[in-house]
């Protein structure tokens, strides 16, 4: 693999939060017959996550049906075909947002840690434990791969309040001026 291949990427458009792909389980990524080069796909997801100031991004959020997501950390973490091995019995209730639902934050209860097995973009499988916000992000993105979004995990009253608040914020956003 050349250095150019390792650095190549595109910023992909996010699908609307009503798109059917967000509500269907994703397909296993086949490293033997990859639909896209895994490193290129990882780079695209990382670039798109960073472009949108996200903490994580799953492939189905950009219209791709495969079991892969990325997370922000000291170095981006790329998870192909992830599986949860263990979760903490202790849970924490914290505000959570999603790139598919701009400006909306709602309290979601999630385990404090998760132990998971996944493959990186180079085809190497590892088992890792994540704690705190990284565990929360991992579980949020895993939900995406299963066709579940964070609004489905929220208390209805808190979700309704979060939707109203998000609408207020969206109304305050001024449309971008076009440069001629």
Image: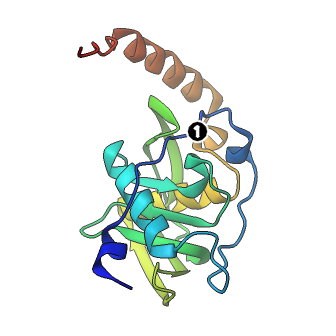
Quadrant of the rendered structure where residue 133 is? bottom left
The picture places residue 160, in percent across and down from the top left corner, at 58, 21
In the image shown, does 160 or 57 lie closer to the viewer? 57
Where 34 falls versus 66 (above or below)? below
Residue drawn at the location 58% of the way across and 43% of the way down: 150
Where 140 falls versus 86 (above or below)? above
Q: State left or right for residue 146 relative to residue 136.
A: right
Give the mark count.
1
Where 13 falls versus 156 (above or below)? below
Residue drawn at the location 70% of the way across and 51% of the way down: 147
Mark 1 lies on a secondary structure that is loop
Q: State left or right for residue 150 relative to residue 23.
A: left
Q: Which residue is mark 1?
A: 15
Quadrant of the rendered structure where residue 139 is? bottom right
Query: Which residue is farthest front?
Result: 180
- One can see residue 87 in this view: no
Mark 1 Cα-neighbour bin, 10 Å: few <14, some 14–19, many ≥20: some
Residue drawn at the location 41% of the way across and 54% of the way down: 10
Image quadrant occupied by the C terminus: top left
Where 51 falls versus 25 (above or below)? above
The picture places residue 115, in percent across and down from the top left corner, at 51, 78
- One can see residue 65 in this view: yes
Q: What scheme was used to colour the molecule?
A: rainbow
Quadrant of the rendered structure where residue 32 is? bottom right
Q: State left or right for residue 43 relative to residue 31.
A: left
Image quadrant occupied by the N terminus: bottom left
In the image shown, does 74 or 32 lie closer to the viewer? 32
The picture places residue 21, in percent across and down from the top left corner, at 71, 47
The picture places residue 101, in percent across and down from the top left corner, at 51, 33
Residue drawn at the location 30% of the way across and 16% of the way down: 176
């Amino acid at each position: 693999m050349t250095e150019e291949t390792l650095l190549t990427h595109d910023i992909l458009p996010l699908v609307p939060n009503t798109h059917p792909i967000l509500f269907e389980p994703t397909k296993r990524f086949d490293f033997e017959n990859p639909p896209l080069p895994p490193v290129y796909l990882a780079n695209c997801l990382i670039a798109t996550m960073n472009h949108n100031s996200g903490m994580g991004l799953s492939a189905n959020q950009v219209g791709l049906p495969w079991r892969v997501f990325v997370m922000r950390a000291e170095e981006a973490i790329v998870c192909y075909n992830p599986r949860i091995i263990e979760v903490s019995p202790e849970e924490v209730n914290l505000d959570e947002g999603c790139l598919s639902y701009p400006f909306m934050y709602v309290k979601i209860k999630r385990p404090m840690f998760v132990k998971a097995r996944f493959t990186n973009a180079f085809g190497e499988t590892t088992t890792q434990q994540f704690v705190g916000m990284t565990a929360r992000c991992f579980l949020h993105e895993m939900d995406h791969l299963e066709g579940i979004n964070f609004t489905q995990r929220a208390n209805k009253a808190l979700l309704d309040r979060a939707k109203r608040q998000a609408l207020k914020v969206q109304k305050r956003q001024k449309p971008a001026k076009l440069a001629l």
